[in-house]
Amino acid sequence: MVAVIAPSVERDLKRRLAGDVLFDPFDRGRYATDASIYQMIPDGVVVPRTNEDIEAALSVARDWGLSVLPRGGGTSQCGQTVNEALVVDTTKYFNKVLELDVEGRRCVVEPGIVLDELNRFLKPYGLWFPVDVSTASRATIGGMTANNSCGGRSIKYGTMRDNVLGLRALLADGSKADFGPVQQDDLTNGGAYGALVRDMLALGAREADEINERFPKVMRRVGGYNIDALVPQNEPNNIAHLLVGSEGTLGFFEAIELKLSPLLPKRAVGICHFPTFYKAMDATQHLVPLGPIGVELVDSTMISLGRDIPIFKKTLDEVVRGDPAALLLVEFAEEDDDANRTKIASLEERMGDLGFSWSGEGEKWGGVVPVFDSALQGRVTEVRKSGLNIMMSMKAERKPVSFVEDCAVELSDLAEYTQKLTEIFERHGTSGTWYAHASVGCLHVRPVLNMKLDQDVKAMRAIAEEAFELVRSYKGSHSGEHGDGIVRSEFHEKMFGTRMVEAFGEVKARFDPEGFFNPGKIVDPPKMDDREKFRFAPDYAAKDFDTALDWSAWPGKAGGFQGAVEMCNNNGACRKLQGGAMCPSYRVTRNEKDLTRGRANTLRLALSGQLGEDALSSDAMMDAMRLCVSCKACKRECPTGVDMARMKIEVLHERAKRRGLSLHDRLVGYLPDYAPYAAKVPWLLNLRNKSPFLARLLEGPSGFSAERALPAWRRDPFHDWEVRDHGTGDVVLFGDTFNRYFEPENLRAATRVLEAGGIKVSAPSTADDKPLCCGRTYLSVGLVDKARAEARRLIDTLLPDVEAGRSIVGLEPSCLLMLRDEIPALVPGEEAERISKAALLFEEFIVREADKGRFNAPLKPLDKPILLHGHCHQKAFNVMSDVEQTLRLI
């Protein structure tokens, strides 16, 4: 249960801050998790608007004895961004570029700016920030700095530490300091900053030999504090690099100065296929000397799972030949196309030298699929960057778990290391999924475990201890990209030795003696397997209840609804601000509450009783769901398949059962029932649109804004008897309620077009002469039983047509596509599946028939441009290309 924090804290914050102050249990629960296995309920959340807000929030926290946790996108995989603290979220308001020096290739940004947004800003200037992490669509520069993030092209560009020039931070005592290269004035300065710099440099000088002995020599070493930045060197030490990778434990970043790079020239990607995983790992050391800017691994598990995800299937079909055990995506970025093609030729030659050929058999099979098309390269990159989420799309209780994920070893040791790590997994009854940065010996591997089971938690502990010992034997790094957090901080002593851990403690004590900032990370950590801090704690249990829809494809209580909700692993892909359509409400509000991830977390907490009784049907739950517009973008674009539009139906159903419907809900939900009667007196119902006074009068009781006109009722609604070949045509025209009563000309026009193309059109033959309805309006207000009854009637009516080989053709995507999606979930079974397969949107049917030479309408070109705006459900079901192809027929 989410505990209540003293109201005085909330009052103090609201009195002093202009930004958002969130202390409701639902809000705090939404910030209790990141992309790790952990959950820690924060004391509260503030979303500051100004720097003064940040300073005030820290001051209030000090006054009340609270810790502070700076937070960006909340996508950390080791538990860095969860704590029992006051969370300060910078993503909503602190996302600007403060300075840009094009000639000097540098900029200064606020911590909440997202990497993709920064690079969109920089692109017109021919620049980019090259630490291209896979979460670029939602990772903030502040979070990347705190984590010392790396990215797929670190072999060329290095880590965040290599690209951060300086930063401004608020310190635990309330003071502010600008960190950067040490100047002579800093060494003689009598102030607090000068003393801090001198103390840190003295520590570096004292520990130089130990650092040289203990710190791994691999590039991907991000564990602990970067005290190697304090060691005496020929150029000025940059104290900012000590704060890079500090995970919010040393200060609160206000501004970060970055080194920029010229945009990449044209690229070429060689997709190397291998017969075994070991062969791929062994080949890496021979491919890297060719000078690629990245070598990324994709294993067979990722290929298999990716082929089941609609957004990735086409790309994989284009670039994967046969059934490889592993792929290496080798990327070149030379000055021109000829140079890139030369590099690909050398890659093919090198693969041949290693003994691989497409005609080879067994361990000799393999080769290179070259990709020169930039659009396809982009799609391939998107698949690789979604590796984690593709792996997490497994619907079983056991899922890939991050805790030994990004250890790094030398390339010469990579094949042997991965083989021995696989043997460790097998000894503990599991296997691992592999992907990511082969070029720098840093592979993301996740053993498949169930974190709800004590035996699997014990296996996790044993695997971690053995894996880190293995890494140490290779003189590698136990933390190669994703930081320390709760998962790895405990193992610093084993990896670095007692003296180094004590030095880390000195750094923390000098910056933050009271443990004010994000305690328990890097220094003085808890046990990594402390189940009280798990998302699935020992007492975690979901409630069982009868669901309205079929969720049997997932495990867990409530018929699998629990498992569907728990598919959200907090990866935050729904936080992207451009590209696709997920999540439209978040793009407007920038509130965690209005995010697919935020809603999924709210549902999980409610289902497990952590938000109190009846949380599922509560006003707070409805507030979380209200701005979900059921666009279904998440159904297609969420890499783990969280379908929030469908989940919302369950919430609405529970609420309708317990609380009934408002007048607004009834007017929306029962539209198909009263529409035939309303169409008889359209002039009466349309008065509301013509009279501003009447619109205002009805606004309160009806719930419809007086500022918006409602659809106008027509005196000439569409009737099924208008279709000539009633019951005998090639297709059945499914007339939806909206087109039927508000825009009947669309159905009439569709009939004319089909018939002009030689298609005979029929209409459904209902027993009661009542028009068919998909039931969408009923579902939109939670009337699931009513929708199910309508679905049953629709199936019974249309099944004879489907058995006769007719397609069901509709115009309105949200209605027609319901036959493919919700109706099989309402009435599971073979009959619904047959209806689903026969249901086509108008444009899908036209394209299919045109391709087969069966649609030959005398179409004439238009003399004006056509502007196309796709329906959200067309995008979710990937049918926009059919719209475009249909328009090209004109």
Image: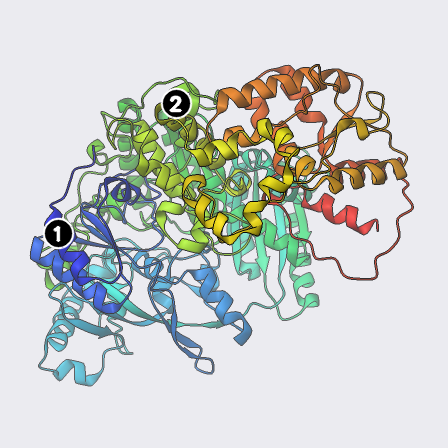
Residue 469 vertical position relative to residue 541 in the rendered view, above or below: below
Q: Residue at x 74, y 49 (%)?
A: 884
Q: How crowded is mark 1: few (under 14 residues within 10 Å), some or many (20 or more)?
A: some
Q: Which of 376 and 819 is in front in this view?
A: 819
Disc 1 secondary structure class: helix
Residue 246 vertical position relative to residue 51 in the rendered view, above or below: above
Task: Indicate which label's residue lies in the foreground, 1 or 2.
Answer: 2
Work out how far the residue at label 1 is from the one at label 2, CA to CA, in angstroms: 37 Å
Q: Where is residue 59 in the image (x, y as percent from the top left)?
A: 13, 62
Which circle's residue, 1 or 2, is located before the other in the chain? 1
Disc 2 secondary structure class: helix
- Image-quadrant location for residue 494: top left
Colour logic: rainbow
Q: Do the residues labelled 1 and 2 touch (CB within 8 Å)?
A: no
Q: Position of residue 509 (x, y in %)?
A: 10, 59
Query: Viewed as shown, does residue 536 lie left or right of 412?
Result: left
Query: Viewed as shown, does residue 774 lie left or right of 862?
Result: left
- Image-quadrant location for residue 673: top right
Q: Which residue is drawn at 41% across and 51% down?
A: 410
- Report the residue marked by disc 2: 657
Q: Where is residue 310 in the image (x, y as percent from the top left)?
A: 60, 38
> Which quadrant holds the N terminus?
top left
> Callout 1, which amino acid?
Val
Whether residue 75 is visible here, answered yes or no, is no
Query: Viewed as shown, does residue 435 lie left or right of 798?
Result: left
- Report the residue marked by disc 1: 9
Residue 359 vertical position relative to residue 216 in the rendered view, above or below: above
Q: Nearer the viewer, residue 743 or 790?
A: 743
Residue 584 vertical position relative to residue 610 in the rendered view, above or below: below
In the picture, the disc for residue 814 is none
> Callout 2, which amino acid?
Lys
Q: Nearer the viewer, residue 116 or 629?
A: 629
